[in-house]
Image (spheres, rainbow, N blue to C red):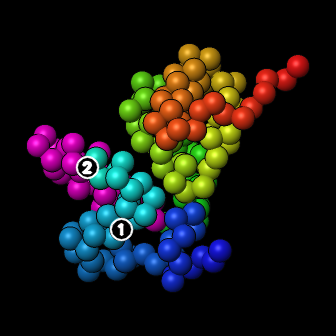
Amino acid sequence: MTSGPDSTDATAAPTADPTADPATTRRQRFEHGKEVLDRVNGDVGEQVIASLADVSPELAHQVVAWGFGEIYSRPELSPRDRQLVTLGMLTALGGCEPQLRVHVHTALNVGLTPQQIVEALLHSTGYCGFPRALNATFAAKEVFAERGLLPLDEAPPA
């Protein structure tokens, strides 16, 4: 598996940043963000954007152009690492279960295993508390069930 400017690997951090040019247009920033969103989120990301069309198309634009086109596409973290950070932050915030479900899908798309996701959520318990870790784990469980990934092959310690 290779990464770099010619790679289509969803787990590789993008290297080209068309937003670095101040002359980049609003439309170009959106198109770049849409490419990144489609690569890592697939249909789930598209559903989120479509759900905003009749209430806040500008928020949808900013999620794509800024969130994915300018922030998510930065090369310093791989998409896999970004998803670990995102899962931890959404768990810490609490009350973000819809967004957690989207990002669990994304985490799976970029190469995290269900067991790694569960481990990250378990790790958050010490920092966020049991209620938030439980809510995040239940959100992840819904995604795992949708994808036919349950039961996980993880035996509790004896």
Instruction: Using the image, determine if residue 21 lies above or below residue 109.
Output: below
Given residues 35 and 72, the one toward you in this image is: 35
Residue 58 located left or right of residue 136: left
Furthest toward the bottom, the residue is 6
The image shows residue 155, relative to residue 115, as above or below, that is above
- Where is residue 151, by image quadrant? top right
Q: Secondary structure at mark 1?
A: helix
Q: Is residue 53 left or right of residue 49?
A: left
- Tell me which segment is drawn in magenta: 48-73
The amino acid type found where label 1 is placed reads Glu
Sooner in the amino-acid sequence: mark 1 or mark 2: 1
Residue 34 seen:
yes
Q: Is residue 23 left or right of residue 43?
A: left
User: Is residue 92 in sight in this rendering?
Assistant: no
Report whether 37 appears left or right of 24. Answer: right
Where residue 112 appears, x then y in whole percent?
A: 62, 50
- The prevailing secondary structure element of the residues shown in magenta is helix
Q: Using a 10 Å C-alpha cutoff, classify the residue at mark 1 as few (fewer than 14 neighbours), some (14 to 19) or many (20 or more).
A: some
Q: Which residue is mark 1?
A: 35
Residue positioned 84% across, 23% down in the render: 157
* Crowd around label 2: few <14 · some 14–19 · many ≥20 (10 Å): some
Element marked by disc 2:
helix
